[in-house]
Amino acid sequence: MEITRFAPSPTGHLHIGGARTALFSYLFAKANKGKFLLRFEDTDQERSKDEYVDSILNSLNWMQIKLDAEPVYQSKKISKHKELAIELYKKGFAYACDCSEETLSKMREEQIAKKQKPKYNGLNRNKNIEFAEGMVLRFKFPLEGESKFKDLILGDIAINNKEFDDFIILRSDGSPTYNFSAAVDDKDMKITTVIRGDDHITNTLKQINVLEVLGATIPKYAHLPMVLAESGKRLSKRDGAEDILDYKKKGYLSDALINYLVRLGWSYGEEEIFSLEKLQKIFDLSDVNSSPSKYSQDLLNWYNNKYLNFLSAEELVLNVKENTEIDFSEINNGNLAISLLAKGANSLNQIAEDSIYFFEDPQVNFDALKIDMNKKILFSEFRKKLKEIDFEKNLIEKFIKEFLQANDLKFPELGKPLRVILTGKENAPSISDLLFILGKETSLKRIEYTLND
């Protein structure tokens, strides 16, 4: 059985890259009838905050990513990690180091002067210094050979061990470091596959070495190429790297975001639309691209438009009301109105913004129409005849067609200014739909206001 984990640091909100990692880990576990676990790597006491824990949990919940166990908090395991670090020291897999900051700075300066990679040079590796409080413990990284693994996405990865230094596993204040704690927790949680960003490859090789000396079963690893901005640079907030819950606030549907995220580097034939239920059955890491993906706001909008139009009118009404407090059930023909607006909308919020003319009179001046004054007579005649018909959709359509023919008009000559009169906007649903939704009384009132202005 596959067991995966998502291990964020609660030092900020969940963003696009992290959300995709969580989603891929979750889908891989479900497709293999396994478990998806969550671990908060919250040992940075200054930057880790409860508000970010809550934000990440709320983001995962909104994305319909369900946990198969209660979250693990790394901060609650510090004492155990410290004991294990000292145990490695006693077994000869780590050593005590009392190098001062001055010594370390001088070491780095000399290496930089020689155009060498700055790293700890093993000064205390073989001195057998007895560990005492205030010292650090360093992991004895293998000096010969190479560290390697077969990545499920990127293939064979190997780095010469000379590229690594003896990294710290226990700080001078007695707190364990990230690479040591992550390895220990993966062992304790029985993680079988680690899925994370490719910026962790070096960390993976360090953790594999720690796991080996702990006698643990080494998980499989899959490193996801980064999600870049459309410019090819790292994602910034301007490019879409914002709190996942901000997408919810802006009126994006979780199903649309899930579908969009999974397509950032993963494909399945020629298909574009995937339900979460289907993804849980078909997701396979072998279908993940080994090249970086690019964030596209236009593509996300396309997906959200698709999913908005998958909803029934009743569902749209509930979603728009929940997100914006605009209630289409308060107006006549609200279901028709919201369905028409959804056709061209990218978000729930856009539907609400575009709907203002269904709730408030636009009060358009005749001069704003920028048409000949003699057209006033034409619109007066239109209003007069409109008043006489029954306001059924097919009868409205028939009336408009006959009025155009009787007055030798092309549709835009009537439709364009009339749309502005009725809505205050140039882009809106069809005239017959608008008249029907607004109703006879409101439609006549708006035309009359413009003519009498």
Image (cartoon, rainbow, N blue to C red):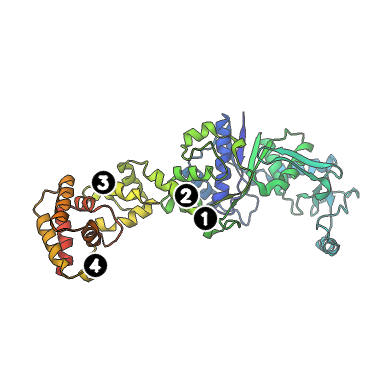
N-terminal label among 1 and 3: 1
Residue bearing the label numbered 1: 240
The image quarter containing residue 231 is bottom right
Residue bearing the label numbered 2: 300
Instruction: Tell me the kind of residue under disc 3.
Output: Leu
N-terminal label among 2 and 4: 2
| Residue 252 shown left or right of residue 279 in the figure | left
N-terminal label among 2 and 1: 1
Query: Observer-nearest residue: 364 or 426?
Result: 426
Q: Quadrant of the N terminus?
A: top right
The image quarter containing residue 68 is top right
Mark 4 neighbour class, 10 Å CA radius: few under 14, some 14 to 19, many 20 or more? some
Q: Between marks 1 and 4, how big is the CA–CA gap?
A: 38 Å
Q: Between marks 2 and 3, how big is the CA–CA gap?
A: 25 Å
Instruction: Tell me the kind of residue under disc 2.
Output: Leu
Q: Up-down: is 134 above or below 217?
A: below
Residue bearing the label numbered 3: 336
- Mark nearest the camera among 2 and 1 is 2
The image quarter containing residue 371 is bottom left
Residue bearing the label numbered 4: 369
Instruction: Tell me the kind of residue under disc 4.
Output: Leu
Q: Which element is circle 1 on? A: loop
Can residue 395 be seen here? The reply is yes
In the displayed image of the protein, which residue is found farthest to the left? 388
N-terminal label among 2 and 3: 2
Instruction: Tell me the kind of residue under disc 1.
Output: Gly
Label 2 with label 1: CB-CB less than 8 Å: yes
| Residue 139 shown left or right of residue 20 in the figure | right
In the displayed image of the protein, which residue is found farthest to the front? 408
Mark 1 neighbour class, 10 Å CA radius: few under 14, some 14 to 19, many 20 or more? some
Q: Quadrant of the C terminus?
A: bottom left
